[in-house]
Image (cartoon, rainbow, N blue to C red):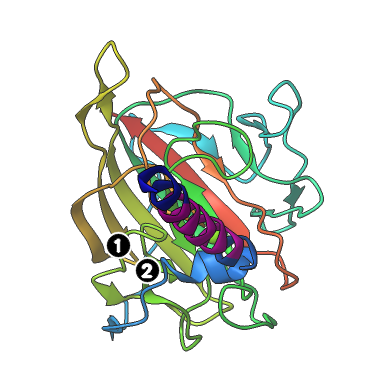
Amino acid sequence: MKKKMFVSIASFFCVGLLAAQEKQSTETPEQQAAKTEVWSPVPKKVDAAVKTSEPPADAYVLFNGKSLNEWVLTSHPDQMATWIINKDGSMMVNKNAGNIQTKKSFTDYQLHLEFKIPATITGEGQARGNSGLFLASTGSGDAGYEIQILDNYTNKTYVNGQCGSVYKQFPPLVNACRKAGEWQSYDIIWTAPRFNEDGSLKSPARVTVFQNGILVQNNTELKGETRWIGTPEYHKHGACPIKLQAHGDKSEPISFRNIWVREL
Ligand code: MG
C-alpha cells in the first residue's frame, strides 16, 4: 500500500515536471528573451556637445579610414574583414560578412570609437541601427561583453537593451543619443575580468562608458558575458580581440570611424 502511494506521488511529480518542461519548450526564443528585458525607469534624455577626438600620441590605431588591416572576420579569424570602406573614410557594416574583430588581443584598455546610424534608418525597437561593441570577443558569433549600439534618439526599446547599455545587464545612466545621421562617440575604460586557475572568477569585469562625452556607465561591474536569452555568466578567458557586430536586423547598415585603443 505504502509502495503504491509512493509510486503515485512520484508519478504526480514526474507529470508536473514534464508539464513544466513542456510549457517551457512551447515558448519561442523571443518569449524566452523577453524575460530578461527591463522597460523602466526610462533613462533621461541629455543633449551632447559637438566634438571629435583624434588619437593621442601613444594610441594604437585600429581604424584610421584607410584600411581594415587591423580587422578579421569573427567567423574566419584567418581572413581579413570584408566590411566596406566608404568614400568619407568610415567603414560600413557588411551584414553578409558578419561580425569582425581585431587581429590583436587586449586585456585592460581605454578605447575611442565613433559610429553613425544612417539618417535614412528605418525599423523600430531592436531592429533600428543595431550593432554592438564587444569589449572582449570570447568566441564566435556574439560571444563576449556587449555595449549596445542602436538608434534610441526617440526609438523605444527595453532600457537594458538601448544604446549605451551593457546589453541585458545595465541601462545607460541617461540617454545621450544623437539623431540618426550624426556621428556619435564612445569613450570607454575596460577592465577585463580575472580568473583563478580552476576557472572560478577572481574579479569581475568593469566598464566606464562616455557616449558623446556624457557618462552612461560609471565603473559598472558586469554580471558576466552578454546573453540574449537567460542570465549572464563568466567563463575563464585571457586577452581577447575587440569585436563589432553585424546585427541581423533589416535596417540600413551603420558606419564607424576613428577607432583607437590605449592599453592600460
Ligand atoms: Mg547589438
Q: Are marks 2 and 1 in contact (CB under 8 Å)?
A: yes
Place of residue 214 in the rendered image (x, y in percent of width and height, measured from the top left): 25, 68
Residue placed at 50% from the left, 35% from the top? Answer: 137
Q: Which mark is residue 120?
A: none
Secondary structure category for the residue under label 2:
helix
- Say whether residue 97 is left or right of residue 228: right
| Residue closer to the observer: 143 or 254 | 143
Q: Residue at x 71, y 60 (%)?
A: 248
Q: Is residue 38 left or right of residue 259?
A: left
Reading the image, the residue beneath label 1 is 170
Image: 138 above or below 168 = above
Crowd tier of the residue under label 1, counting other residues whose Cα lies within 10 Å: few below 14, some 14–19, many 20 or above: many
Q: Report the amino acid beneath label 2.
A: Asn
Residue under the point 78% across and 40% down: 82
> What whole-number distance in Å separates the C-alpha atoms at marks 2 and 1?
5 Å
Please tell me which residue lies in front, 112 or 29. 29
- Going by the numbered disc 1, the residue's amino acid type is Phe
Inspect the magenta stretch and tell me whether residue 11 lies in it.
Answer: yes
Badge 2 crowding class, 10 Å Cα cut-off, few under 14, some 14 to 19, many 20 or more, is many
Helix, strand or loop at mark 1? loop
Q: Quadrant of residue 93?
A: bottom right
Q: Quadrant of ligand 1?
A: bottom right
Which sits in the foreground, 188 or 98? Answer: 98
Viewed as shown, does residue 3 lie left or right of 48?
Answer: right
Asked whether residue 136 is in view, the answer is yes
Pick out the residue farthest to the front. 1
The residue at which mark 2 appears reads as 160
Q: Which residues are magenta?
A: 8-22
Q: Residue furthest bottom?
A: 154
Q: How many marks?
A: 2
